[in-house]
Image: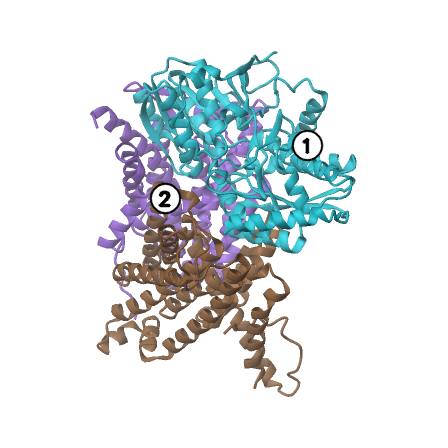
Amino acid sequence: MNAQLFALAVFDGVAYAALVFMVAVGLTLIFGVLRILNVAHGSFYAIGAYLTASIGGAIFAAGYAPWLALPLMFLAAAIVGIVLGGPIERLLLRRIYAKEDALQLLVTFAVFMILEDVQRLIWGTQPYFEATALQQLGNIEVFGVFYTTYQLVVLPLVAITVLISLRLFLRKTLSGKLILAVTEDRETATAIGIDADKVYLLTFVVGAALAGFGGALASATTSVVPGMGADMIVLSFAVVATAGLGQIEGAAIAALLIGLGRSFAVYLMPELQVLIPYLIMLLVLLVRPEGLFGVVRTRKI
Amino acid sequence: MTLRIAVPIVLLAIVALLPLVAPWSQVVLTLALAKGLAVLGIVLLLHAGQVSFGHALFFAVAAYSAAFLGEAFAGGELVMMIVLGLGASLFFGLMVGLFVVRYRHIFFGMLNLAFSMIFYSILEKFYHVTGGADGMQVARPTVVGIEMERAGFETLLFYGSLVLCVAVAFCIHRFLSSPIGNMFKTIKTNETRLEYLGISARRTLLVGYVVSAGLCGLGGVLMAVAQGIVTPEYAWWIRSGELVFIAILGGAGSVAGAFVGAIIYEAVRVNAAAFAADVWQMVLGFFLLAIILFASRGLVGLYERLMDRLESKKPQAKEPQEKRVPGAAE
Amino acid sequence: MRRWLTLAASAAVLLSTATASAAEKPDELKIGITAFLSGPASVFGEPAKAAADMMIEEMNAAGGIGGVPIRAFFVDEGAGGEAVLSEYRRLVQDVEVDAMFASISSGNCNKVAPLAEDLKVLNFMWDCGTQRIFEENDYRYVFRTQGNATPEMLSTVLYLLKTKPDFQSIAVVNQDYAWGRDSWAIFSTALKALKPDVEVVAEFFPKFGTPDFSTEISRLQAMRPDVILSTSWGGDLDTFVRQASQRGLTNTSTLVLPLAESSLERLGNALPPGHIVGGRGDHYFLHPEKKSDPEFAEFVEAFREKTGAYPIYPVFHMSQALNALKAAYEKAIEANGGEWPSHEQVVDAMQGLKFQGLGREVQIRSDGQGIEAMLLGTTTKADGYDFAVLDNMMLFDGGQITTPVGEVSLEWLGTLDQDFLDGIEVESFSHGQ
């Protein structure tokens, strides 16, 4: 493997990691606060992609300006967060916080199953593809190989922006600090008068919107097809578990690790490509059960 | 004989006789029983308060063992398949168990998930060995050396599975009320106390884990021979989720519930696929939500509640309740 | 055992024909059709179902088959192998269908073929491609009303050799499942036999349903092979082609896409001119021999009106299965002196049966395999279509390129040589022709 190929593998790995991070970060945020591993997160991702691709396809065909592609992605993310995430937390999850882990997880599994069919009823089964955003930005040539600006520059930039703004939001704003307080210690936070219900709702909406945004971003680079959510959710599980549940910065590192591992596998041992995320997760968990950046919590007796 | 005991026996008899009336139901019921065995493995772990989202791994290990045996010996022998499948799943259960029993709750679940996904990826990737995503055919094996026709084999498989399930259910029931079974349950309620008694929680959990892997293995072999094909999908995370789903549906912690849940699940699934082909997943999803929100003790819980009510107003307990009552298959 | 069974069955048939018993004419002819109505492969199942509904309605309006109307029962292959098998049993044993059309997935065909034989039900493998089924087993009740992977891939090799004889290197990007692996095995065996000097520079088998081929495309750009083969389909193929054309890979390498006929309309402008496209048979909505046939043109328009898209190859396959059924019943009725035939008589009628769907005539040969013509072409731009259409089309006769009865494809392909290549007859057509 020469320097050229090495560089190519790094570029591909980073672009891929950026997309995976967008989904994983929402998942880890929700887990950090609600203590629920949300299987339906994969559906949010898929629905974000479907919304962007179908609305985009319609408005660009009608002759609207291509620069609308980016605002459209935000719109899709907002719809996923508010229209889907909000009601699911208020009407469903709120009723099961007192139940066992397994039941909570199964509720989100049920939502996932329902949403899979909802997607099919709304969007049918034909693949959607809407790459206006990506085509607008053109290509960049690196070492004689063409990359799309969108994947090489935009996706990593967006991911870093999201990471930094989330950090600022959590550390500098009141809502963010409330979320952190509840993450740290739910009981104490409630005891000092924090409205935990509101914090839960806010977190879930933001987390779902992030998944939707991840889907919206991905829709420019890939065909939107039935079943895309099921694959993404296990992958983001792997990222989140590798990083440590609830670790936002950790998720970025873990996504990078998995993204790079995957792209180097394509160059070195293509057969291992699909195994890489799980192998990394397994190795990390065996050495550090709480994940790379996870904090050990004392078990309640 | 009280109604509480009579209903399950009647239901068991109905299950046993149903294929005579509706021949196509025989294979569906066999598949349900196979899944029921695997679900029993999940139920066992639930008693220790642990949920595995990767037990489909052992299901697949045993199913593929049977397939490889069949391939190696041109058809193979059912008894050998069961022995090999069980052995392989117990071995894998021990190996994986040695790692995962150190963890609890969500980490336990995730680690299991990771192992099963690795196995899934291997099955899917190594096409030249495992047949890749299309899996392997399992030709109809001989039974104690006798070659059988399809109809005879399916009947034998169904009644064999039924007997096996009843026997296994009885054993697990006994296991849970045995001293080691009680220690096992203490992992859920108070693990520290167990350690104070000088008993290793890890070793206790390992025993339960290996047994549960073996149960999944038995189910996997039956599934493989009943279906005639094994695919990597057997180890896919949605399969593991399905097993947990059925355990909760039947009644978490209930031995009988595992089988009741499996039969109801399979019935809903087959009917939904036939009559609501576009939305069968949605139907199952709502079904699951309803159970968790309104009957978190599952079908067996509903049954117990109904029986309690009937017994409290004793004499008129003659209502034909069977229809509403999903009873026990044990 | 199976042979003995077949023998016994044929003996039983002989007996029943000897007594010349006519079966009672049913009220309706029931067929079970398995197709993907969910999951990624529903890009094939949905159009095929729409076509089946249209064609059955039309056939019934014209008196059905021998005066008996047809009724179809659909099974969703997307529900998984178990559900398909149990539904299959239910349809045969409970609903008592007269014939089954199963299935789209080769995996399901593998499962269903022995079951059909056990249940003694007439089964058409109406869309699946695996060439192994008839090469590895003998069946009485199972037939394929179309070609299989071998002629599909061999015709692709031949087209490539005829249109681009000087290429030096090839890479492959196939889906990682039996079709992707088997089709590459067939293609590469044939290529090695017919043009041994070609270098295979990379073999990628990304996971089925991969959303992202960026890394593969980077590597392919660094290697610049003359030809890139991909037998992928559906969302995977769309994604690959779009990502390849976005990044300019389509300018440096020729894509060879034997299944892309089913993606042409969806791909729009993403598939530039100059790439090779096939449609698993002579399936193309502008079929050069058929497009001026008013019945064909009318169907294409009606289908487009109903579904919003031009018909793709599964629609052609569905028309072949339905017409095969009709032809088989009519042949059996005639052989039975005008009386309604028994199930076994219909199965007998399948031998050597000739029928025609939307494409050229197809014939069933003695092992149950259909002989179907193959059409390939090169993409071009044309007025009136906002997606690539085919030019420089070639129609290959199926008889020459299908593995002979009793031979195994991979061995047979290995024996091909220059004489074989010279002996191939082909008819060429251009877009406007």
Which chain letter goes with mark 2? A
Instruction: Indicate the colour of chain A.
Output: purple
Instruction: Indicate the colour of chain B.
Output: brown
Foreground pick, A176 / B204 = B204
Q: Amino acid at mark 1?
A: Lys
C13 relative position to C167: left or right: right
Quadrant for residue A268, please give it.
Answer: top left
B41 relative position to B250: left or right: left
User: Which residue is pictured at 47% across the width and 60% down the height?
Assistant: B245
* Image chain in cyan: C
User: Which residue is pictured at 26% across the width and 53% down the height?
Assistant: A285
Foreground pick, C120 / A209 = C120
Instruction: In the rendered view, tell whether residue A64 sits above or below residue C212.
Output: above
The image shows residue A75 at horizontal and vertical percentages of 50, 36
Query: What SS does tag 2 mark?
Result: helix
The image shows residue B50 at horizontal and vertical percentages of 36, 65
The image shows residue C106 at horizontal and vertical percentages of 49, 40
Instruction: In the rendered view, tell whether residue A85 sits above or below residue C129.
Output: below
Quadrant for residue C100, please give it.
Answer: top right
C312 relative position to A70: left or right: right
Q: Residues within 10 Å of mark 2 (few under 14, many from 20)?
A: some
Q: Mark 1 sits on what residue?
A: C306
Q: Assign the C terminus of chain A to one quadrant of the image.
A: bottom left
Which chain letter goes with mark 1? C
Q: Amino acid at mark 2?
A: Phe
